[in-house]
Image (cartoon, rainbow, N blue to C red):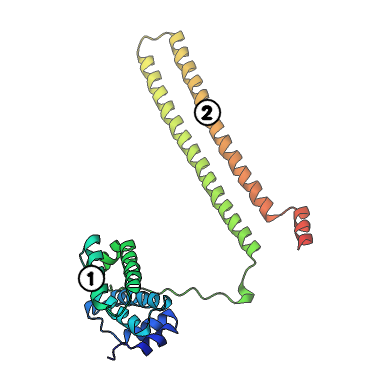
């Protein structure tokens, strides 16, 4: 693996970021994160950003190569450090590894690296300390879309919507009719049970010493109760029949649209 030279830095600086990182990758070993492509890429991006900062600030090409080497070695060593410890290490590495730079350039590169690290300290520490992630293997079942019908077998969207509306209304009508049947069956059953209970009471009264007025009262009360229950049932059934009638009107309106509305739609088209 060839070391990074001033000419290499010039070529990297002339390319776009993705190509620049690829070329930078050829000049360093990234042993700290072997097998973890995401961490290696973040490490490479860090070195690339520091290198390009030095280029844009007019650092000498040879000094810029030294900056890249220093930043490559620096980042893994920041693992587990608190902010103050990390800033102290950055200052030490800039001073020891970049002796050829002027004091102004060393201050500039120190400030950039320190600001970059401090601003994203939690991200970098997570990147440095968390265990390497294992790429899960997931098997997915690919469901292809259904084969569309031939154009001649297709259906106009308006026709399809009309049929769907008719289908829903037909289902609603069947449901209402079932409710009416159940109401009638339940009413007939209850009437039968009440009649049997009344006849039983009537039979008991015949065996006893009940008078004529008492018998008449029993019959009157039974008929009155039956009339009230019958009226309640009739009201419920009438409401269901009205709802069923409304559904049939809606279905008829859909099946036979208003000619005036159709002509207006054709005019708009």
Would you say residue 134 is visible in this rendering?
no
Measured as percent of width and height from the top left, residue 48 is found at 36, 77
Q: Of all residues shown, which one is farthest toward the bottom?
A: 2
Image x and y of residue 108, in percent: 35, 70
Question: Mark 2 touching mark 1, by CB under 8 A?
Answer: no
Instruction: Name the side, left or right, on which 99 lies relative to 198.
Output: left
Give the residue at x 79% y 60%. Answer: 267
Q: Who's the residue at 43% across and 76% down the image?
A: 56
Percent position (x, y) of residue 87? Answer: 26, 64
Q: Position of residue 254 (x, y in %)?
A: 67, 54
So how many labels did they put on this image? 2
Looking at the rendered structure, the secondary structure element under dot 2 is: helix
Structural crowding at the residue carrying mark 2, measured as other residues with C-alpha within 10 Å and reported as few (<14), some (14–19) or many (≥20): few
Q: Within 10 angstroms of label 1, few (less than 14), some, or many (20 or more) residues?
A: few
On the image, which quarter does residue 118 sit in? bottom left
Q: Residue at x 67, y 51 (%)?
A: 252
Tell me: residue 199, above or below residue 212.
Answer: below
Q: Which residue is mark 2?
A: 232
119, above or below 153, in the image: above
Per the model, the C-alpha gap separating discs 2 and 1 is 95 Å
The answer to whether residue 65 is above or below residue 268 is below
Foreground of the two, 167 or 266: 266
| Quadrant in which the N terminus is drawn | bottom left
Image quadrant in which the C terminus is located:
bottom right
Q: Nearer the viewer, residue 263 or 176?
A: 263
Among the two numbered marks 2 and 1 on one chain, the one whose residue lies closer to the N terminus: 1
Residue under label 1, please give it. Answer: 92
Q: Is residue 9 left or right of residue 71?
A: right
Residue found 67% across the figure and 55% down from its top: 255
């Amino acid at each position: 693996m060839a070391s990074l030279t001033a000419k290499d830095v010039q070529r990297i600086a002339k390319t776009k970021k993705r190509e620049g990182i690829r070329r930078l990758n050829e000049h360093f070993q990234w042993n700290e994160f072997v097998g973890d492509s995401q961490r290696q890429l973040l490490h490479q991006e860090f070195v690339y950003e520091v290198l390009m900062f030095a280029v844009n600030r007019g650092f000498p090409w040879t000094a810029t190569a030294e900056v890249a080497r220093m930043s490559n070695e620096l980042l893994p060593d920041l693992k587990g450090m608190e902010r103050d410890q990390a800033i102290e290490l950055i200052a030490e590495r800039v001073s020891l590894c970049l002796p050829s730079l002027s004091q102004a350039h060393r201050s500039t590169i120190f400030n950039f690296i320190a600001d970059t690290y401090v601003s994203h300290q939690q991200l970098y520490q997570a990147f440095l300390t968390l265990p390497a992630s294992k790429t899960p293997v997931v098997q997915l079942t690919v469901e292809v879309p259904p084969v569309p019908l031939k154009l001649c077998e297709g259906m106009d969207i308006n026709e399809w919507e009309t049929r769907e509306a008719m289908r829903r209304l037909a289902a609603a009508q069947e449901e209402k009719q079932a409710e009416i049947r159940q109401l009638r069956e339940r009413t007939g059953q209850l009437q039968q049970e009440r009649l049997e209970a009344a006849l039983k009471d009537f039979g008991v009264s015949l065996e006893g010493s009940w008078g004529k007025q008492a018998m008449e009262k029993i019959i009157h009360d039974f008929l009155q109760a039956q009339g009230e229950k019958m009226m309640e049932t009739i009201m419920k059934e009438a409401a269901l029949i009205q709802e069923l009638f409304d559904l049939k009107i809606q279905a008829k309106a859909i099946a036979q649209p208003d000619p005036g509305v159709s002509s207006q739609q054709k005019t708009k088209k």
